[in-house]
Image (cartoon, helix red, strand yellow):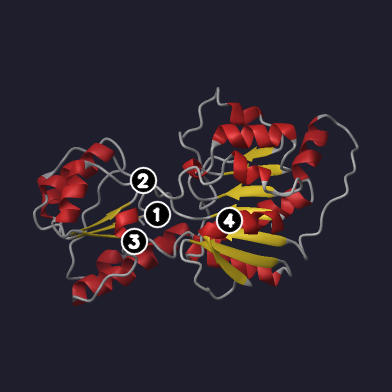
Amino acid sequence: MPHLGEQYPGVRFVPVPMKGAELREEYLEAEAMFRSAMDEDLFDRIVDGAPKLSWVQIAAAGFDWMGGPALERRLGEGLQMTRSGNSFNAPIAEYAIGTMISMARQLPDYYRAQQEHRWARYVGRDFAGSTVGIFGTGAIGQEVAWRTTALRATALGVSRSGRPVDGFAEVHPSSSLAEVLPRCDFVVLAMPLTPETRHMFGAEQFAGMKPTAVVVNVGRGALIDDDALISALTSGQIAGAVLDAFVDEPLPADSPLWGTPNAVITPHTSFRTDGNDVRLCTDFCVNLDHFLAGRPLVGTMKEPALGY
């Protein structure tokens, strides 16, 4: 964010190195913080020791990875925390659409054939006319939904409440999971991790899917029971999975997921594109304008009790 000083001449901006930074007195004078990649211990020490700090914006779409006693205490004292709500929605949605189409057209099979120097030909599936179940109807889910519809597929939403949302042909409450899953050719997981959604997808859910169904996880790794997924893929109970989030990251080299048939693994990169910095700066500046004017911030937690 090199031009912020010119854009806000009355504001002092203090850069904090991503790694190897020592706690400096000027960090403790902060009234607001934009937190991207930085040392966890240093972040905790700043939050704990900066008495005037009243707002932290994080360079992430979700809150569940944040934590620590100092932050919890400060949040209880009134510290506001906001997310970068519009920075990653579009690239994650593009990733979801791209991977669904690549699985439908069996690109992983073609890649394996190429590695083996085999002239293999497969019959792909049409994405148009398919049904995509999108679990999570927030900003990311909505971006996936309108792209799905534009490609002449049907977007079914599933959320905690089941309230209608623009862009979805239907939205169902999570209590209707068992009725929605058998209709889906693709299942996109884009919901936050909460006590209610942890391991929402296990053996029972995979058993209720079509044998041709593909799961795409752009949410959190713990939304899926890994053992149940490995079993479902190995047995052919479902056709494939694209995984971009994991309980342990980096994914350990000895994880059985690496060798699971019809699993495509990417290193939590669905959000990474060359337009992120501009979007992150725009999101931050929107809230900085609100902060300086004393207006309510955007991107705060919708359900604080559930952590999102």
Marked residue nearer the N-terminal end (3 or 4): 4
The amino acid at mark 4 is Leu
Mark 1 residue crowding within 10 angstroms, few (<14) / some (14–19) / many (20+): many
Residue plotted at (34% across, 65% down):
299
Circle 1 or circle 4, nearest the eye: 4
* The N terminus - image quarter: bottom left
Q: Residue 265: which quarter of the image?
A: top right
Residue plotted at (41% across, 63% down):
85
Q: What residue does disc 3 label? A: 303
Q: Is mark 4 on a helix, strand or loop?
A: helix
Residue plotted at (64% across, 43% down):
206
Q: Residue 62 carries which label?
A: 1
The residue nearer to you, when weighing 91 against 151, is 151
The amino acid at mark 2 is Trp
Q: What residue does disc 2 label? A: 65
Residue plotted at (31% across, 47% down):
66
